[in-house]
Amino acid sequence: MTTLVSRLPLRQALRIDPAAAVAAALGTLLVAPVAAVNGGYSPTSWGWVTLGLAWAGILALVLRADVSIGLLEAIAILALAALVLWSLVSVAWSDDAGASVLSTERLLVYATAIAVAALLVRAQASTALVGGVWAGATLICSYGVLTRMYPDRFLGNAEIAGSRLAQPVGYWNSLGLLAAVGLLVAAGLVSVTRSRLIGAAAAASLVPLALALYFTFSRGASIALAAGAVAVLVLDPRRLRFLVTTLVAGAAPAAAVLKGAHLPALTTLGASASQTASAGSTLMHVALVAGIVAALAGALLVEADRRIEVARAVRVATAVFLVVAVLAGAGAASARYGSPVSIAKRAWHSFTARPPKHSAADLNRRLFTLSNNGRVVLWRVAWRDFQAHPLNGSGAGSYYGVWVQGRSDGTQVRNAHSLYLETLAELGAPGLFLLGLALLAPLAAVARVRKAPLVPVATGAYLAFLIHTGFDWDWQLPGVALAPLLLGAALLAAARPEGRRLHAGTVSRAAAVTVLVVAAGFAVFALVGNRALASTQRATTAQRWAAAESNARRASSLQPWSAEPSRVLGEAKLQQGRLRQARASFRTGLAKNPHDWRLWLDLALASQGKARPAAARRALALNPHSVEIARISTFLRIRL
């Protein structure tokens, strides 16, 4: 992996390979800054990312003498581009055009990222891209751990000290996935690098990454990590090296996690900020020592790899040992818990059962349950929606409206907690086909370059993402999803020399530049509208009514398809007691989205006489289990 490390003397090793620097910067800058802003969840962050990527791609197309991509890269790019267009076309039949356009904007981030990665990252620099993703994930997880240790000093969980770690991403399970991706890549770096410095740094990073994963208390992320590790062991020809590295370099991080697990202030709900800070200070000392020990272990492992040549017989024996260990473990599990069918039934029962209630609120206990936390219900609603619209779906971003109308209780969610089922529900079978084509292309590349450095660990981390996003909503957090997607791009780039390459001529370059210019223009237009809408919401919260109305009108002119600007404009007028004008704004919004229960409820609040209960009943029909409507049902003069 000469793009990432070197055996040359120090002066020559410090020389920067421009291709590797670009790839590493792309990985770091697309993960850390985006994930740091609430995981990139807000639409106001998407335009900036797409715009920056588009112009980077344009510069590459204009300035590079040779631009070529692999066949699998072309398939992934075209599949994502088609998915973006299909999502945009779904506005025509979607009940919520505004949500459909927003979903398309987020998809455009991913499509542009994969396309630009193909243009910028040379095949020999693919390992540097993997290293950049590791650096970005480590930075985010390290900050997250600091918010847990010192809630009084860092923005984070001061107000809910002792709960699951979510900062700065904003969602604990997705932060856990990012930590799992970082752990796999860090272990892989230690196992393949010839640089003691990189080996020490990667091993030391295992400490904050492991602590971040643990404090999310995410079972799904832990399962994804285990699946990814198994994939690495299956794929990696140097699996013995990876296994030894994981055991040796992972010992100190494991000790730090064990210490954290025995600090009640960090693992129990309800601990005060001062108690958390005291426990965090103790854990920080342990973590620093663990980091030093892990760094030394990493450096020694690299040195040992330089000096010790492992015989083929030992490698074969290791593979046999792993197979025997798996079979022995399966036999022990069968003896203890019954046949595989019995184990599967018990696991399914645990998965579908309600989450257990722990009086001590000990978060450690949740790690040993398989409860789905209501996901099965979410999936059933998505599946029923797909059955109703199998070809075109109900429209991109429409799941929330389907959920509130079809749910059986007042559970509040916006996503189906499964990328694949939500895509089926919103974009139908064609949408899932295009998504699958794009996501599976990197796995097809693995067969060609399985023995290349970091390919097995990148594959394991990518598989962890594919598994985790099947039962969670990581896709809605670009700062998290971009990390494994870039690993997929690295796999595609690594396979480029082994596959058919497509060289860009003058015509194809001009076409690609045109597409990127259009994407950049769309991103700017969307960004201005999203910022205006966000400014309206902030001004309304601060009771700056003139600013709220001005920004809302601007957002409405920039987003004529969306009902949201009319809703926030009407709410600003409602707060000022301007009922007639508020009703007019709400009706304008309902003309664009007659299925928005919030607009009907707002109209009810702004109406008088018989019009009030009539609008309220319409809101209740669209959201039968609304907690908001139930609280003010008497005022609205409706019977639930």
Image (tube, rainbow, N blue to C red):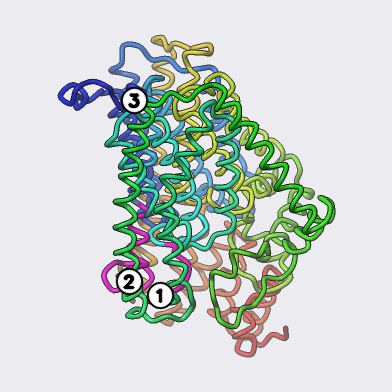
Q: Nearer the viewer, residue 65 or 123?
A: 123
User: Where does the image place residue 562, in percent across and percent down from the top left?
Assistant: 51, 54
Q: How far is mark 3 from mark 2, CA to CA?
A: 43 Å
Q: Residue at x 36, y 80 (%)?
A: 275
| Mark 2 element type | loop
Q: Which mark is residue 329?
A: none
Q: Decide: marks 1, 2 in contact (CB < 8 A)?
A: yes
Q: How far is mark 1 from mark 2, CA to CA?
A: 7 Å
User: Where does the image place residue 159, in percent across and percent down from the top left?
Assistant: 38, 77
| Mark 1 element type | loop
Q: Quadrant of the N terminus?
A: top left
Residue holding disc 3: 58
User: Where does the image place residue 185, in percent across and percent down from the top left?
Assistant: 44, 39
Q: Would you place residue 408 above or below residue 489 in this image?
A: below
| Mark 3 element type | helix
Residue holding disc 1: 161
Q: Amino acid at mark 1?
A: Ala
Q: Residue at x 44, y 26 (%)?
A: 453
Q: Would you place residue 616 above or below residue 522 in this image?
A: below
Residue holding disc 2: 151
Earlier-in-chain disc, 3 versus 1: 3
Earlier-in-chain disc, 3 versus 2: 3
- Toward the left, the furthest residue is 11
Quarter where residue 153 is shown:
bottom left
Q: Nearer the viewer, residue 442 or 253?
A: 253
Earlier-in-chain disc, 1 versus 2: 2
The magenta span reads 140-166
Q: Quadrant of the C terminus?
A: bottom right
Of the residues tagged 3 and 2, which is closer to the observer? Answer: 2
- On the question of residue 210 being in view, the answer is yes
